[in-house]
């Protein structure tokens, strides 16, 4: 649960860190779905809504088949989803992200249109997906999907600033398992 290449600045008395891994190509990777909104403030400048909606790891929880030194048989373990496709994206949007938006969204802004903006990755669902529209219409919220224009700098600030800050904080924890990585990212968020 680390990078392929990592720079260390060590004192003369410190030893080089040692990483145990079969190969640099076998380093585990987990993708996360992160939901942010514009923070809201009242007339006095006090924060009424932080804008943090949630961070959702793209993992499945499977029971272990055998008992080991680390865990009993049947313990649920997080496994990264190796193939992200439209069905996985639709499932996470409809079953995890939308209920969290409905729960955390400020009650003053319920009638306004909510636009979920994302990049143009081919595995994402279409902007006018029927199942997504059906789920959003049932709630009373006006939620729409919008793909980011190609080569747009709109989300570049998030990539360079916010997401790199979360990743830098997560790397300080040095997680060794997928569950530890998920906890580190959620605490960094």
Image: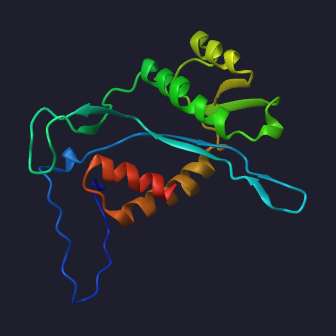
**Vertical side of 88 occupied by 1: above or below:** below
Give the x, y percent position of residue 93: 54, 27
Residue positioned 41% across, 59% down in the render? 170
Residue positioned 46% across, 19% down in the render? 86
Query: Residue furthest toward the bottom?
Result: 13
Residue positioned 52% across, 52% down in the render? 163
Give the x, y percent position of residue 13: 21, 89
Instruction: Tell me if I can see residue 16 in this picture.
Output: yes
Give the x, y percent position of residue 63: 22, 32
- Quarter location, residue 138: top right
Position of 51 compared to 69: left or right? right
**Vertical side of 75 occupied by 131: above or below:** above
Give the x, y percent position of residue 41: 81, 55
Residue positioned 71% across, 30% down in the render? 115
Instruction: Tell me if I can see residue 128 in this picture.
Output: no
**Vertical side of 86 occupied by 174: above or below:** below
Position of 81 compared to 163: left or right? left
């Amino acid at each position: 649960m680390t990078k392929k290449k990592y720079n260390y600045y060590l004192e003369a008395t410190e030893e080089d860190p040692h990483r145990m891994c079969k190969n640099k190509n076998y380093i585990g990777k987990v993708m996360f779905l992160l939901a942010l909104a514009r923070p809201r403030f009242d007339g006095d400048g006090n924060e009424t809504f932080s804008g943090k909606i949630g961070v959702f790891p793209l993992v499945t929880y499977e029971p272990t088949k055998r008992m080991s030194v680390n865990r009993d048989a049947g313990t649920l373990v997080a496994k990264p989803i190796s193939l992200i496709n439209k069905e996985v994206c639709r499932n996470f949007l409809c079953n995890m992200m939308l209920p969290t938006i409905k729960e955390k969204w400020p009650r003053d802004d319920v009638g306004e249109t909510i636009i979920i903006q994302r990049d143009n990755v081919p595995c994402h669902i279409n902007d006018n997906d029927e199942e997504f529209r059906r789920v959003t219409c049932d709630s009373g919220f006006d939620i729409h999907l919008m793909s980011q224009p190609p080569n747009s700098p709109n989300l570049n600030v998030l990539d360079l600033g916010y997401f790199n800050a979360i990743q830098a904080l997560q790397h300080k924890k040095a997680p060794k398992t997928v569950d530890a990585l998920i906890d580190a990212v959620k605490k960094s968020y």
